[in-house]
Image (cartoon, rainbow, N blue to C red):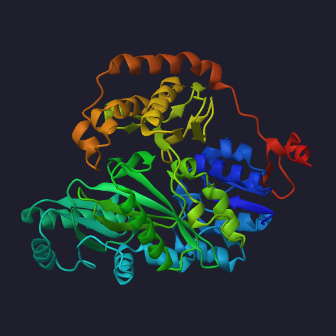
Amino acid sequence: MFKRVLIANRGEIAVRVIRACRELGVETVAVYSEADRTALHVQYADYAYPIGPSPSAESYLVIDKIIEVAQKSGAEAIHPGYGFLSERAAFARACQEAGVTFIGPTPEAIEQMGDKVTARGIMQQANVPVVPGTDVLGAEDEVVAAAREIGFPVMFKASAGGGGKGMRLVSAEDEVVSALRGVRSEAKSSFGDDRMYMEKFVEKPRHVEVQVLADTYGHTLHLYERECSLQRRHQKVIEEAPSTAISPEVREQMGRVAVEAARAVNYVGAGTVEFLVDAHQNFYFLEMNTRIQVEHPVTELVTGVDLVKAQIEVAAGEHLAVQQDEIKQRGWAIECRIYAEDPARDFFPSPGRIQVLRTPGGSGIRDDSGVYEGWEVPIFYDPMISKLCTHGSTRQEAIQRMLRALQEYTVEGIITNIPFHRWALQHPRFIQGDLDTGFIPQEYHGLAFEEDALHQEVLLSAAALAAYHKDQTVQRSQPDSAGGRVSAWRSKGWREGLR
């Protein structure tokens, strides 16, 4: 096992990895931008090093800075979390060249699955079902002809896309050229790559993904599926496991196909094979995420497998600790992503200082968070502040437990999407499990509660406490001899307490 691991990320996922490392007896190194100097992951880690200004392009996305800190701190491995550099083959390759273990798949697997056109071809060769579509699109007149042949509606997708960007639905022939130009421009600005491909649009699709794990000894297994159909602007907001969409027979079939997909690229570590599922339970390969997923806790809750610890163990050269026949789904789990955003104003980001924070507890509750009371939610990054999960013996119990937890969850000083989650979980279609990726656009038309009163209350609360918090600072830990900082855990004898 490694002695020391660097986490090349921030927020709740950095805290999550630190906790897994601590259970394995592994020291941790955090990196932080100027905006994150007092962040929770910085305080939790054994060591912390600055890596630059607040914008991620000048800090968390700079490969050379991350590698430099790894070498300076003595970290033997780097966990990329999700987002940022987690699916950059260049980063995985830079780790190899620096003699640092990348906790994830090989650069080659990342490249193969990161290019959506290449991934489609590999899946077709592996007999994994894919949505009818094209290779890289060419001239506009050829695209029009191809769309006509496939049949409308169709979906344009960026070959290098991800995170819901570089996608455009086209319903008629006269929309093709303008949509293609627009989405190509978006792909170029987002990914530096304007290559596009086209797929037949599956009507009322459900987004169901399968978690896979693989070690370096050729053992690959699946941990069943997650339902991720509740999305806004192609971004997931509520996930659950298992899915209400598929039968036990289809569940087993999807698991086997996901394992074959992973084996097709000699995958190592934790990954997710994503599928679109139609109304007849036909499923089609969508993409593979070559990293840990945001929604991994729901799989952990229903299977009992710690996916992050498994990632680290596999990267350290250990065999998978479980076999396929040992993995069972137990009960039901739901995850609500708690964002600093305003559901009454089209989910507009709501950065600011968290004046009051009270998180829910009790049986079957898990809250993966990267914030604390007094923390300033920065404007530079994704506004997710926590992932609230519940587990119950049945779906109904998990839903009721989540509604209770959301009622207990108190955040003042910023606006959050907690009211939206309460609305969604009480919607008749959600209760019945009647979901598809169009659920939010179809059903959500704003909230019926007194929005103006809510906003006024938040603003008054923030103003009343602003003076008190103005001069308050979070306690800094002391510099160490290597130029980083030793955490308060370490300076207060936390590690010594384990000896």
Q: Residue at x 32, y 38 (%)?
A: 430
Where's residue 13, x and y in %?
Answer: 59, 50
Q: Residue at x 32, y 68 (%)?
A: 158
Nearer-the-camera pick, 181 or 436: 436
Q: Is residue 428 left or right of residue 175?
A: right
Extreme residue toward the left, this view:
174
181 lies above or below 381:
below
Q: Is residue 354 above or below residue 499?
A: above
Question: Can residue 163 be seen by looking at this rendering?
Answer: no
* Residue in view at x 51 percent, y 77 percent: 109
Name which residue lies at 92% across and 49% down. 499
The quarter of the image holding the N terminus is bottom right
In the image, is 305 to the left or to the right of 110?
Answer: right
Seen from the viewer's position, the closer of residues 271 and 115 is 271
Q: Position of residue 369 (x, y in %)?
A: 59, 40
Q: How many marks?
A: 0
Any part of residue 471 in sight = yes
Asked whether, in this view, residue 361 is left or right of residue 164, the answer is: right
Residue 16 spot, x, y in % from top left: 64, 49
User: Residue 101: x percent and y percent?
Assistant: 69, 72
